[in-house]
Image (cartoon, grey):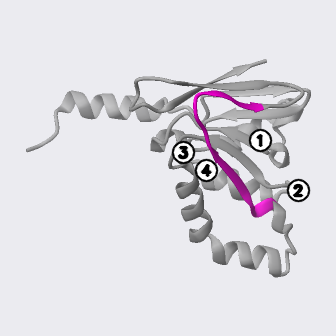
Amino acid sequence: MLPDPAINRWAREKANKLQTCVDTNVVNDAAYLVDFGPGVVRRASAAFGQGVKGLAVANLKRAFLTHLHSDHTAGYPDLIFTPAVLGREAPLEVYGPKGLKTMTEHILKAYAEDIEIRVKGLEGGNPEAYKVNAYEINPGVIYKDQNVTVKAFLVNQLLAASLRLSL
């Protein structure tokens, strides 16, 4: 049975409008990404090129994930590795729902040879930059620093955590 043409048209239209990131907040030159779909690092780099200092690729140090759908996570390997190659000095900090740690472990395992070459090879990459601290969150305050407080709330989309940044 062939798929309904209306569904195919809807899927193509949605694919053309996919957001790379649901929200990006920059406070005092600190970047706070909410979700990391396809192209998130390149879009941040483009914004940096337009004068948003906090979105320098090496400054992408923390992110928050609302749920594990691929349109919200397909840019995760890029978020882990590109800033590491381009000068991030500390591990990436990521907060999200149950399953985030497993996803992170699999990505790091898939790229283990690349990490080894970049850290121990001619690049002499910073091993800390290739690490990820993944935190699986529950509803409530999940992150707080001098700039923002992040709270997680349950929503009806497969009981995924939805995040709100309180600035």
Amino acid beneath label 4: Tyr
Which numbered disc, 4 or 1, marks the residue closer to the eye?
Answer: 4
98 or 89, which is in the foreground? Answer: 98
Q: CA distance from mark 1 to mark 2?
A: 17 Å
Q: CA distance from mark 4 to mark 3?
A: 5 Å
Amino acid beneath label 3: Thr
> Regarding mark 4 in the picture, which secondary structure is present there?
helix
Residue 94 at x, y percent in the picture: 68, 45
Residue 45 at x, y percent in the picture: 77, 41
Q: Which residue is mark 3?
A: 73
Task: Give the left or right position of residue 28, taking residue 135 as reference.
Answer: right
- Dominant secondary structure of the residues highlighted in magenta in the image: strand
| Pointer 4 with pointer 1, Cβ within 8 A | no
Q: Residue at x 76, y 63 (%)?
A: 130
Q: Which residue is mark 2?
A: 89
Q: CA distance from mark 3 to mark 1?
A: 18 Å
Task: Give the left or right position of residue 22, taking residue 99 as reference.
Answer: right
Mark 3 or mark 2, earlier in chain: 3
Residue 161 at x, y percent in the picture: 53, 31
Q: Which mark is residue 129?
A: none
> Regarding mark 1 in the picture, which secondary structure is present there?
helix
Amino acid beneath label 2: Glu
Q: Which residue is mark 1?
A: 45
Q: Quadrant of residue 128?
A: bottom right
Label 1: how many Cα within 10 Å (few below 14, some 14–19, many 20+): many
Q: Residue at x 84, y 44 (%)?
A: 59
Which stretch is magenta? 129-143
Q: Which residue is mark 4?
A: 76
Label 2: how many Cα within 10 Å (few below 14, some 14–19, many 20+): some
